[in-house]
Amino acid sequence: MADTAEMDEILTAFRRFSVHGDTKASGKELNGKNWAKLCKDCKINDGKNVSGTDVDIVFSKVKQKTSRVITYEEFQMALQELAPKRFKGQSKEEALESIFKLVEGREPSNAGVTKVAKAPALDRLTDASRYTGSHKERFDGSGRGKGREGREELVENTGYEVTQEVTQEVTQEVTQKVTQEVTQKVTQEVTQEVTQEVTQKVTQEVTQEVTQEVTQKVTQEVTQEVTQEVTQEVTQEVM
């Protein structure tokens, strides 16, 4: 089992990775991104026995359900989970000791960070006082860049320009309002006209159908009555 000195070194590594990339971090909690970096920088994730997927699974296993970080105690639990997988063939205690050795005193690597080389040639190239032509106009006397002022001809803001902007905004608002009102009125008028036409057409069609049906019924009834009367009269005369 690791002694007190070794555990102090592990705690130191935990704190270093906890604050990596976050100046406001307290050093008491480790997020998933920095946990993955620790495993990679400390060679726990060797791409063979332990993969990035294994690292993520263990992190999710030891953290609280609603949390996105792990505490130092949960960090130790995570190392215990990965130790037998990383050091196959060793006993549980030996594997844990071996994984502690990988972490002790480590700090985040700065791989991928480009360092600026110092050389006389570079100094000459970056000395703004030696620039000529349009390049010279982009820097002030101290060598500091002028930004847009050094690249573009900026028009001075005047009251006329402000008036133009205000006029454009007001014009847009008025145009939108008038357009909405006109659209509403036209829509209402068109709707009324269409409704009237449809109503008239439907009324005519219904009236025609009803008239036809009534006419047929009346005709049938009259025909029946007349037929009966004629039949009765003829029968009486014959008798």
Image (cartoon, rainbow, N blue to C red):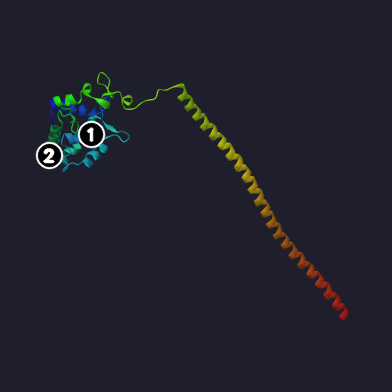
Depth check, mark 1 against mark 2: the one in front is: 1
Q: Could you classify mark 1 by the number of other residues whose Cα lies within 10 Å: few (under 14), some (14-19), or many (20 or more)?
A: many
Residue position marked by numbered label 2 in the rendering: 91
Residue farthest bottom in this picture = 238
Type of amino acid at the residue the image marks with label 2: Ser
Q: What mark, if any, has residue 35 been given in the picture?
A: 1
Disc 1 to disc 2, C-alpha distance: 25 Å
Type of amino acid at the residue the image marks with label 1: Trp
How many callouts does the rendering have?
A: 2
Assign the N terminus to one quadrant of the image.
top left
Asked if residue 119 can be seen in this view, the reply is: no
Q: Find residue 130 and report its image quarter.
A: top left
Q: What mark, if any, has residue 172 been given in the picture?
A: none
Percent across and percent down for residue 42 are 16, 34
Q: Is residue 49 above or below residue 140?
A: below
Percent across and percent down for residue 235 are 85, 78
Name the residue: 77% across, 66% down: 219
Q: Find residue 10 and report its image quarter.
A: top left
Query: Circle 1 — which element?
Result: helix
Q: Could you classify mark 2 by the number of other residues whose Cα lies within 10 Å: few (under 14), some (14-19), or many (20 or more)?
A: few
Q: Find residue 4 and report its image quarter.
A: top left
Assign the C terminus to one quadrant of the image.
bottom right
Is 4 placed left or right of 60 in the picture?
Answer: left
Is 131 placed left or right of 176 in the picture?
Answer: left
Percent across and percent down for residue 34 are 23, 32
Front residue of this view, candidates 40 and 85: 40
Is 235 placed left or right of 61 in the picture?
Answer: right
Name the residue: 66% across, 48% down: 196
Front residue of this view, candidates 234 and 164: 164
